[in-house]
Image (spheres, coloured by chain):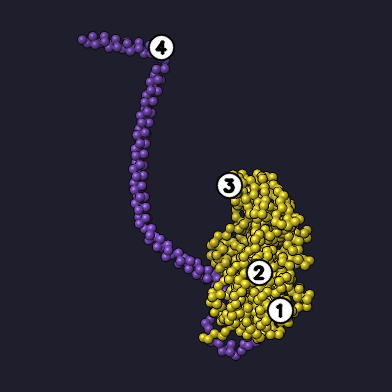
Chain colours: A yellow, B purple
Amino acid sequence: MITQLTADEQGLAFTASAEDRSVVLDLLLDGRRIWSFRCADADRGLGAVADRWSVPWPSVLRPHLEGSATFTLRPVGGDGAAQSVDVTLGTGSGRIRFTDRDGMALMVNKWGQLGHALGDWDDGMVTRLLDHVDQVRAGLLAGNDLDVYVTSGTLLGPYRDGHLIPSDDDADLAYLSRHTHPVAVIQESFQLGRRLAAAGLTVQRYSAGHLQVHFENQGRPDVYVDVFTGWIDDVGWWYQTFAVRSRVARDRLVPVSTIEVEGRTEPAPREPEAVLATIYGPNWRTPDPAFTFEVPPATSNRFWGWLSDAGMDRSLWELVLGDAPHGDPAGPSGAARLLAERLGPGSAVLELGCGRGEDALWLAGRGHRVEAVDYAHRPLLDAQSVADVNMSPARFRPLNLYDLRRVMALGTEVAARDEPVHVLAHDLLPTLWDVGRPALFRLLSMVLRTGGEAHLDVMTSPPKRSAGAPPEPGPLWRELAVADLEAEMRPFALHVREAHPLVEEVRTGPGAGRGPVTRTRMVVEWQRSTR
Amino acid sequence: MAAVDQVKRFGRGAARLMARRARRLLVPDYDELVSDRDRALHELQVAFESVTAAHQGIADLQAEQRALQERLNATLLLAEAAEPRLNEVVVRVEPRLEQLEDGLHEARRLNLRIAELTDIVTEIVLPLHHRDIDAERVADLAPDTQ
């Protein structure tokens, strides 16, 4: 039995006996489930009091913990009574609100990220979600000889009781490719992504074997659909993102069977139990909202090698950029100001990693022809809305620097204009994972061949966090040495023409204040190879 | 003399008969008790032999244990002697293992690169240059195997 629940700025503490350590606990905020964890994952409490355990707040929840609330720990499966505690946290007043900017209830999902639990949506969500699933499935099947079926949570819940899992946050579809080699499987995935986009759907690529299809409802993001790629190789290993690697014969997966999902018939793998046991392990029949995937390195290394990852903090940036109010009171960045001083009238500007587009809008307001790209979807839509309302010529479009094909497509398009282009990439290098830098330099080498220059900057000391600021939910700042970058750029015929050390004030994290950082601003140009 | 012996035998026989009758009268279960005694003596003998065999078995095991201990000690000595060489091997192999893992990753990543490049060529390069393709030059391309 869980007893003596307390909560403070650091997290929760409670008393649980040895036999309760196997229990899964739901955390409720004012009666609504927002997270689940295993009692066994809690740490020994301060002072090592017998049977006293503590668990820190999830990092993505911390910025929201301002005000008063009733927190409840409820054992899953009715194993014991719930325990509640009233607490006031932070300096905020009123009730703690764990919602997004649209007022939609948030939860901490099985990846430790923010999500929207299906159980927190409006009554019409189920119908809309199943319509989305059918729409995506129709797009996948149009002109393709594919086996498509529901998988993961969309198979697990309905196979147990016919219903979606309330703590799940999306719908999951998978297809089993007829191809056996990763190259052919990836090429097929590229084609399928294009087909879905051609069908008018908003498709985001999260790897060479994982697509996410997004929808809107009444001007807000609606519940989305994942599309996972599966194939069986020449020696009989079944792979499915993410991340299944198991010896399962094709005839156990297809031809598809059917399953009732909330009263609607959907395609299912031929032997659902084989699939569920492979994905969730032998205890898949028991509901476990604290379930997390434990993928063996032999599997994750293969998926990372073959399919890479095109997500790379994208959800984090959607959160960081999407929830902040538009319009930085500090005005355009120093990088944008410096660039503006060097531009002739009506120059062509390409901004990479534009975020909320404040610099792009400012530069467009000064008469420049600005095109701005980012991989965070919603901030781009917001920026374009601001541009449209203000009759700004700035154009915003998505570009994922982790998708080489899209980088090459943009590079080709911009280079074909045959005019000097000035590139602004403020705060991009410190936030870009190393696997994204070659694509960035490839893009610069394409668009700078007709003249122009690129303005990049790097952090030479990370921002000092302001006292009491909530911890950052991810690695938003990386230190890079200019000399290393010069060496990386050299094969792309890029040359650092100028490097200016300076100190600037920056935001130290989501919801935090500003602090000084030292950085080096570089001006990069393309030089024809002498060889 | 023969008559004396006969008298003596008669006397002993009579005495035995009287003794048997007295035993039957005084201890009716005498024969059964004797039988039990004999069986118990036999079982005691068997048990004694078993204990003797067990002692021998324990002695054998102790000898075997001593032999094993000696072999273990010898093996430990060998292992200690080989440890520096083993460490050298680990130091030499570890970086190679990392190189192999990096190489394996690179080899796997080539699948993606091939797919990306094929996609770029078919979806960007060829459509953009379609109009520049000279049909006569295509016809002049070197013949290939069939």
Q: Residue at x 35, y 12 (%)?
A: B19
Q: Mark 3 = which residue?
A: A48
**At x 26% / y 10%, what residue is drawn?**
B8
Give the label, 3 or 2, closer to the camera: 2
Query: In terms of image quadrants, where is residue B57?
Result: top left
* Image quadrant occupied by the N terminus of chain B: top left
Residue assigned mark 2: A506
Q: Which chain letter goes with mark 4?
A: B
At which x and y percent is residue A202?
A: 71, 70
What amino acid is found at the position of numbered circle 1 in the picture? Leu
Q: Is residue A258 above or below residue A432?
A: above
Q: Which residue is mark 1?
A: A363
The local crowd at label 3, few if under 14, some if 14 to 19, many if 20 or more residues have their Cα within 10 Å, is few
Q: Is residue A480 above or below residue B25?
A: below
Q: Report crowding for label 4: few under 14, some 14 to 19, many 20 or more residues within 10 A (C-alpha).
A: few
Marks 1 and 2: same chain? Answer: yes
Q: Is there CB contact under 8 Å for labels 4 and 3? A: no
Q: CA distance from mark 1 to mark 4?
A: 135 Å
Can residue A514 be seen here? The reply is yes
First-in-chain label (3 vs 1): 3
Q: Is residue B77 left or right of residue A126?
A: left
Q: Chain of mark 1?
A: A
Q: Label 2 lies in what chain? A: A
Chain bearing tag 3 is: A
Q: In this rendering, would A367 be left or right of A446? A: right
For marks 1 and 2, give the CA distance: 20 Å
Element carrying mark 2: strand
